[in-house]
Amino acid sequence: MEEELSPGQALDEIDRVDRQVRRSARAVARLFLILGLCSMVYWPAVSLGRGLVAGLAGAGWIVLTIASCVYWSRMRVHDRYTMWINSRASAAYVLATLVVFVFVTVFLPDDRGPGWIAVLVAVSVLVGSPLVYAAWRIRGRR
């Protein structure tokens, strides 16, 4: 048997659910921001770093990826707008990551001068921008 709510109780319940959705959207925005900024640092660290620096960047990226996937799967509330932004940001992020991967493996020479390093930094910023933009859009909406 269903419990009947008074109008005041119904409004309180709507406010509680709205706060929970807003809180989860802010957490997703923080997650996108962290992943975007870490992506911008990851590619130069792996491409320019030697030995321990490259290894730590790779290991850190694996840990961050696993943690973000676990976090995302454990979230209990997903609003439509966040899911809409997530699908577009994820597609843009994967495409940008492929562009950077191709650049690093095919075009980036072993003898890297300042010009090549500047291009690497520019494409590294490119790869993180979809996630940073998604974080900005979610925070602005919530």
Image: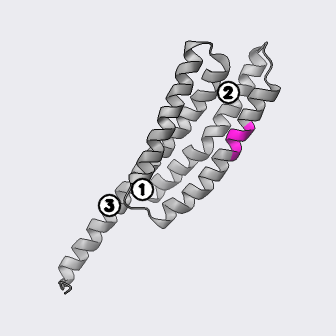
Residue of label 1: 25
The type of residue carrying mark 3 is Gln
Examine the rendered structure and indicate whether residue 10 appears above or below residue 45.
below
Q: Is 115 part of what is drawn in magenta?
A: no
Nearer to us in this view, 61 or 84: 61
Q: Position of residue 28 (x, y in %)?
A: 45, 50
Residue at (63%, 13%) from the top-left corner?
Answer: 50
Examine the rendered structure and indicate whether residue 102 appears above or below residue 141.
above
Q: Is residue 103 left or right of residue 18?
A: right
Q: Is residue 14 left or right of residue 38?
A: left
Residue at (48%, 46%) from the top-left corner?
Answer: 69
Disc 1 element: helix
Residues under numbered marks 3 and 1 in contact, where contact means CB atoms less than 8 Å apart: no
Highlighted range, magenta: 95-99
Residue of label 3: 20
**Any part of residue 34 in sight:** no
Residue 10: which numbered mark, if any?
none
